[in-house]
Image (cartoon, rainbow, N blue to C red):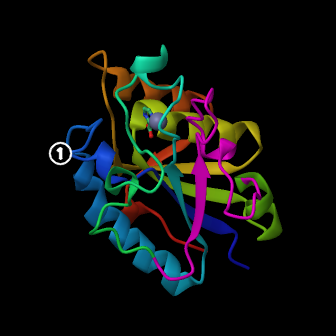
Amino acid sequence: MVDTALLIVDVQNDFCPGGALPVPEGDKVVPVLNRAIDRFRQAGAPVIASRDWHPEKSTHFAAYGGQWPVHCVQNTEGAAFHPDLRLPDDVIIVSKGMGENEDAYSAFDARTEDGTPLESVLKAKGVKRLVVGGLATDYCVRASVLGALERGFEVLVLRDAVRGVDVQPGDSEKALAEMQSKGAKLVTLEEISVQ
Ligand code: VGL
Ligand code: ZN
C-alpha cells in the first residue's frame, strides 16, 4: 500500500521571479518537483498541489491592513501554477485564503473544489506520510509542515525543492530548523523512496 503523498505548496506565478510577491529563486523548485512528480506517479502515489487563492479585497493585503502586496487573486495569471510545473492529470488541487479576512498560510486550511479539507482528502486515501516542497519556506511551507505534524503525519521536507521569502535574512533557515525540531525530516529528492 502506498501511504505517501507529494504535497506541492503554492508554486504559482506570483511567487516566482517577475510575480507580485516573488520568492528569490522561486522557479528553481520547478525542475526538482517535476522529477518528484514523475517518481510519485510511477509509484501510484497521490500528488496534491495547494494554491493561494485570494479575493481582490482581503485583509491579507497591505492595502487593507495586512502584510503583503496583492498576489494570487483568484483566476488571474499571477495565481496560475508555474507554466513549467508538470502537474499530472489526476492532481488534487486544494485552494486557500478565499475569505476576505483570511491569511491561510497552511495547506491544511485549503479545500478541494467541492469543499473537502486537505486532511479529509489525505485520510480518505490512507496517506500517512507527506513529502513537501514548494513556496515559501518561511510561510506556507512552514505552516503546512507544522500543520501536518500536529495532525500526526510523518513529514519529509524536500530541502532542494523549497525557497523562502526571507523578509528578515535567515527566516528560511530558522523555519527549516523549527520544522526539524518539531519532527520533520529534511531530505533531498534523491534520498527518499516512495512507497
Ligand atoms: C505565502 C505570503 C503570503 C506563501 C502566501 O505561499 O508562502 N506567503 N501568502
Ligand atoms: Zn497569500
Task: Tell me the quarter of the picture where residue 152 sits.
Answer: top right
List x then y, in percent, for residue 53: 52, 47
Q: Identify the image quadrant of the C terminus.
A: bottom right
Image check: 161 left or right of 122?
left
Crowding at label 1, few (<14), some or many (≥20) Cα neighbours within 10 Å? few
Task: Name the residue that disc number 1 marks.
Answer: 18
List x then y, in percent, for residue 115: 75, 57
Q: Which residues are magenta?
A: 88-117
Residue for point 57% across, 29% down:
103
Q: Identify the image quadrant of the N terminus.
A: bottom right
Q: Secondary structure at mark 1?
A: loop
Q: Which of the pair 102/8 is nearer the observer? A: 102
Q: How many marks?
A: 1
Residue for point 48% across, 18% down:
64
Residue for point 50% across, 52% down:
51
Q: Residue furthest front?
A: 57
Type of the residue with mark 1: Gly
Q: Is mark 1 within 8 Å of ligand 1?
A: no
Q: Which of the pair 65/91 is nearer the observer? A: 65
